[in-house]
Amino acid sequence: MTKSENLTKYLLAGLTGLIVAALYAPIVLTIFYSFYKSRKGKVDWGSFSYEPYTKLIFERQILESLMNSIYVGIVTVICSVVIGFYFANYYHTSKSKMKEFLQFIIFLPFLLPPIITGLSLLIFFREINLPRSLNTVVIGHTIFVLAIVFKIILNKLETLKPSLMESAYDLGASKWQAFYYVLLPNIKLSLIIAGLLAFTISLDETLITLFLIGNDTTWPIKLWAKMRVGFSKQVNASVTLILILTSLLVLLIASIISRSEKKIMY
């Protein structure tokens, strides 16, 4: 190996290290400062405590906001998966030229900045006199994540042979029977992955929620309100818990994808 190749190798290694540090150092520091106090950049090594986490567990407002986030996430999953499957199946089977316009409409809220999507929905709900609540947040989250759910399901539908459903119909199956016994088993994993991803995005979403939440609160909104007062060990603990929960969901999605790919290979 020549000197120039060695130099390139070390430069790439150093650059990779800097990128990794830039990405993960804030996360590591957030977790670290959820256990230790610091003042003017100096760490108080004798201040190690689990107290911020125990306070979070037993604080009523935090538990209420967490339950609200879970409720919004679950209902968002149900709505986005049902609507996403309907549109994906229509796009896959239809020969209409309007289906490209449909795809554009589905992707537009996801591609726009969240502040534009949230503000647009706020104006719309105000014009139709729909009061802001957790249900308006569900609508906003469903519109936002629909593009991802739609694309995941559509990609799976496009891998299936057209003769699959035709064979079911030829054997006398109704549309419902063909869906339940033939189509659903083949797209089940994609529906699960789409649902988990929708739940993960909904759980972390803040900006759209801020416009649509009304008098209720969700976990990210509660965290944002605490951050406005100032950063504390409890704020860092809240961020840490969100990071852990999100990471576990992402790992679960990755695990399901990996297992499904192995089944396809063998």
Image: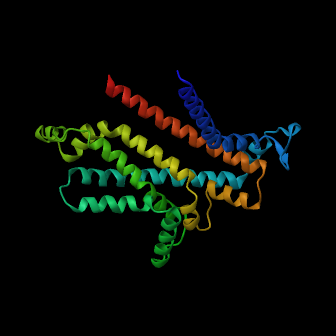
Q: Quadrant location of residue 186? A: top left
Q: Quadrant of residue 47?
A: top right
Q: Is residue 235 above or below residue 14?
A: below
| Residue 241 position within the rendered picture, expressed as x and y whole percent measured from the top left | 66, 43
Q: Residue at 68% x, 55% y: name it.
A: 223
Q: How is the image coloured?
A: rainbow
Spot occupied by residue 73 in the image (x, y as percentages of width and height): 51, 51
Tell me which residue sits at (50%, 35%) in the image.
252
User: 125 or 16, which is in the foreground?
Assistant: 16
Q: Is residue 155 left or right of residue 142?
A: left
Q: Nearer the viewer, residue 17 or 128?
A: 17
In the orientation shown, which residue stands out farthest toward the front? 3
- In the rendered view of the protein, which quadrant contains the C terminus? top left
**Total labels drawn:** 0
The answer to whether residue 114 is left or right of residue 223 is left
Whole-percent x and y of residue 48? 83, 38
Q: Residue at x 21, y 42 (%)?
A: 178
Measured along the vertical axis of the image, is residue 116 above or below residue 23? below
Task: Point out the residue furthest to the left here.
Answer: 170
| Vertical order, 197 against 206 (above or below) | above
The x and y percentages for residue 78 are 42, 51
**In-image side of 162 versus 205 (left or right):** left
Identity of the residue drawn at 45% across and 77% down: 128
> Closest to the observer: 55 or 258?
258
